[in-house]
Image: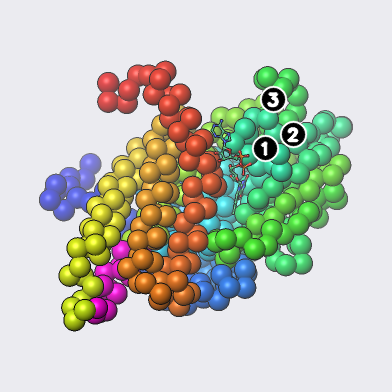
Amino acid sequence: MTSVSLSSFDLAVPTEEHKMLRDQVRAFARDEVEPQALEHDRHERFNRRLFEKVGELGLLGVTVTEKDGGAGMDATAAVIVHEELSACDPGFALAYLAHSMLCVNNLAVNATDEQKRRWLPKLLTGEAIGAMGMSEPAVGTDVLGLRTTAKKDGDHWVVNGRKMWITNGAVDDERTPCDVMLFYARTGGSDARPEITSFVVQRGTPGFGVGQKIHDKAGMRGSNTAEMVLEDARVPADNLVGEQGGAIKCMMRNLALERVTLAAMSLGIARRSIEVMVSYANDRKAFGKPLNEFGQIQRHIAESYAEYMACRAYVYDTARRMPLDAYGNRLDSDGVKLVASTMGKVVADRAMQVLGGYGYVGEYVVERLWRDAKLLEIGGGTIEAHQKNMTRDLTRGPFPWA
Ligand SMILES: Cc1cc2nc3c(=O)[nH]c(=O)nc-3n(C[C@H](O)[C@H](O)[C@H](O)COP(=O)(O)OP(=O)(O)OC[C@H]3O[C@@H](n4cnc5c(N)ncnc54)[C@H](O)[C@@H]3O)c2cc1C
């Protein structure tokens, strides 16, 4: 067991390995992610080449065991990568999250060894793009009401339904679907107790395709979002992931990691917004003195810093306590996303206010962060969904500190 000096302990970089990871991703984000962010946002384009570079760095499988070809790291490492990428380009970070957390990590935890050998190698290099389809046109928060069905037919499942808002669902503007989509479907049960099973569908499966690429998103424009169609799609029986009817546990386990990494994206947005507003308030003068001497500007800066630091502690503490192969972390994985998503949005808004007119223009970065920040109050569970889940868990008790 390694001993840690209390004075040097930092939840956000608990070990030397985490520090090296943060330094590596921060340098990569500064040198390679930042320069392309505004352009890809403007043209609503996903940077496929840059994504493959993330694969070359070994980060597409950050939480995948070394035995399965990944970096073998923990939830804290995943949070570090998301915070650093998001500080430069939240849209690109969202594409990374959908691939590495929602698809790759889900397969790494729930698929058989044979399935992992089939799908993981290309997903880990970025040669294949992965997505996860849970939401549907008529079903979001009420996820257990999903309508996509899978019916067994010999050694295949025949799947019918639509998946909506799927990050990485399309890989380009030509409606080319992703290579691998992990999705949830009903395989039986009743409306009150649906039997839900997860499957993988691959590009080239007849009946599987992109219904529409979603354009004109307010933010996160560096990631593709699409509606996916499954029309009599024949999915081989050995593409069923986990056990038939056993997908709710897999879904809950993956949602916990999704929420803590989405919260980390809000940390990245807030941290960058604070850097931009402080630097601007130092340089810009009004009424003969720097902006940082005005009390109202000081309030924007000080409150942003304190709120960011409070969320940072909560996010990294939750990640530290989050095993990747268990579930039951809902209270705090919902909790961190509830507070951090709104904090990120508010801090980006304050940064824009401090920059005045310049803040409203793309070149000054914070207007993009401000647009991207809003999605984090919606995607991966709305803030109302977190309030509902957390109240249910707290009412059932016991309190986590009991
Ligand atoms: C850019 C983007 C990327 C996304 N990526 C993915 C992805 O990769 N994969 C995927 O599966 N999904 C993805 N989503 C979908 C996302 O997770 C859903 O949008 C989200 O879960 C909300 O579902 P909904 O949009 O259907 O809203 P609804 O569930 O219809 O909610 C509408 C409103 O009603 C409120 N509401 C609903 N139920 C309750 C309740 N019980 N109590 C109080 N209020 C309630 C909601 O909070 C919200 O304010 C993405 C969405 C976006 C916009």
Determine if the magenta segment contains residue 74. no
Q: Nearer the viewer, mark 1 or mark 3?
A: 1
**Which amino acid does the dot numbered 2 rest on?**
Arg
* Mark 1 crowdedness (10 Å alpha carbons): few <14, some 14-19, many ≥20: some
Q: Residue at x 68, y 19 (%)?
A: 192
Dominant SS of magenta comes to: helix
Residue nearest the viewer, comparing 123 with 338? 338
Q: Kindly identify which residue carries mark 3.
A: 195
Q: Nearer the viewer, mark 2 or mark 1?
A: 1
**Which amino acid does the dot numbered 1 rest on?**
Val
Q: Rounded to the nearest whole Å, what is the CA distance between mark 3 and mark 2? A: 11 Å
91 up-or-down from 357: above or below? above
Element type where label 1 sits in the image: loop
* Mark 2 crowdedness (10 Å alpha carbons): few <14, some 14-19, many ≥20: many
Q: Kindly identify which residue carries mark 1.
A: 139
Q: Are dots 2 and 1 in contact, CB under 8 Å?
A: yes
Report the magenta residues as a range. Answer: 272-286
Residue 241 percent across, percent down from the top left:
66, 37
Q: Along the polypeptide, which appears first: circle 1 or circle 3?
A: 1
Q: Along the polypeptide, which appears first: circle 3 or circle 2?
A: 2
Asked if residue 50 shows in the view, the reply is yes
Q: Quadrant of ligand 1?
A: top right
Find out if the beta carbon at label 1 lies less than 8 Å from the nearest ligand 1 atom: yes
Left or right: residue 102 versus residue 314 is right
Q: Kindly identify which residue carries mark 2.
A: 147
Residue 149 percent across, percent down from the top left:
78, 33
